[in-house]
Amino acid sequence: MRKVFWLVLTGLLVASTAVAQSYPSQPVTFVVGFGAGGGTDLTGRGLAQAMGEYWGVTTTVINVTGGSGGIAAEQVITSARNGYTILVSPEIMAAQAVMGFHPTTAFEHWQHFTAAGFNGVISVRPDSPFQTIEQLFDHVRANPNTVTLGASSAGTIWHIQSELTRDVADINFRFVPYQGSAPAQVAAVSGEIDVVWTSIGEQRDLLRSGQLRPLAVFTSEPVDIPGVGVVPAVTSAVPELEDFLPFSSFIGLAVPRDMPEEIQAAIEEAYLAAVASEGFRDLIEGQLTGSVLGFDRVQSDEFVQRNTSVIAWLLYDLDLADNSPEQFGIPRP
């Protein structure tokens, strides 16, 4: 009996090694929880293309919108642990549990590969009466809940930044959520909303073409946006925000943490090659005006755990979260 047991165990180990060595031998699907054209989508497509080229296999990107990314997370967390379904993970994963979007927590159930970071920009239409961020904030402070502000869904970094500004400076917009940054920007251009708050890279073409006009970047220093000019820092209008900066978006990949180590290592190898590639750097730094982070698994774990604490507790302290971070073992930063 013992001989049979060891033969079976040896067979399983050999089979597992063979699978890992042959991975990937078929197309790999990357799942995006937000609409096409936004920062999460474009970053995911850039990673998928570069990793596919490294592996020599076809990669497919699908957009599974809804539930503020929760539906996409559910599709990946319930998939086979074979590495053929990978989640494109924005920072909203740090908020999913406390916001009730998905029961998993970013650092306990997922292995992350944090690829890039992006700063936010607050913009209006060219014909908007607000010429400066000070004018906008003064008007909103005097007329709360009358100016509409659009961004990707509740719990995303842009929503959190706007709510943090509300709490710090008593600036109450009427928030309008969209299934991604791209539709929020379309809404701003069409006049459906008054203000849009997304990333610099996502707005870049609209800013350059004059369809949107930037009022401030969510940074502590002004930013020179190529083709647009120098945009003031939000702290010029709300100096108190300095204590919370830097506070920006981060996007990468995630797989279930209990995926076999050999497959995770194969994904990490291709991912590290992708973030180092010229094409991906041109996308992030050139087209999206962001920063390549390129964190490996260990660095990503430390980064995501720290940011999960910050984001989850900030949402809870602002009375925006349905659940306490303590319920999920998320320590206060």
Image (cartoon, rainbow, N blue to C red):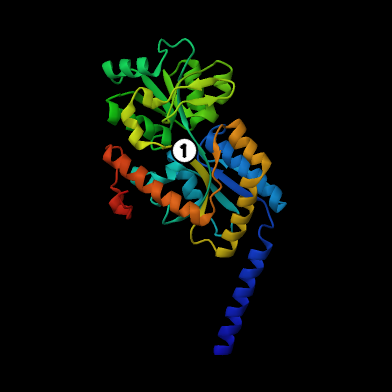
Q: Is residue 68 left or right of residue 211?
A: left
Q: Is residue 1 visible?
A: no
| Residue 313: image location, x then y, percent | 31, 44
Residue at 62% across / 36% down in the picture? 283
- Could you tell me which secondary element the residue under label 1 belongs to? strand
Depicted 319 relative to depicted 97: above or below: above
Q: From the viewer's perspective, tell me whether residue 138 is left or right of residue 249.
A: left
Tell me residue 104's x, y (percent). 40, 52
Image point 59% across, 21% down: which residue?
A: 227
Q: Does residue 329 lie above or below 66 as drawn?
A: below
* Quadrant in the rendering for residue 41: top right
The residue positioned 55% from the left and 58% from the top of the image is 80
User: Can you say whether 11 is above or below 214 in the image?
Assistant: below
Using the image, determine if residue 299 lies above or below residue 12. above
Between 99 and 304, the residue placed more toward the observer is: 304
Label 1 sits on what residue type? Ser
**Picture coordinates of residue 65 (x, y %)?**
50, 38
> What residue sits 29% from the left and 42% below the top?
316
Which residue is the site of mark 1?
A: 249
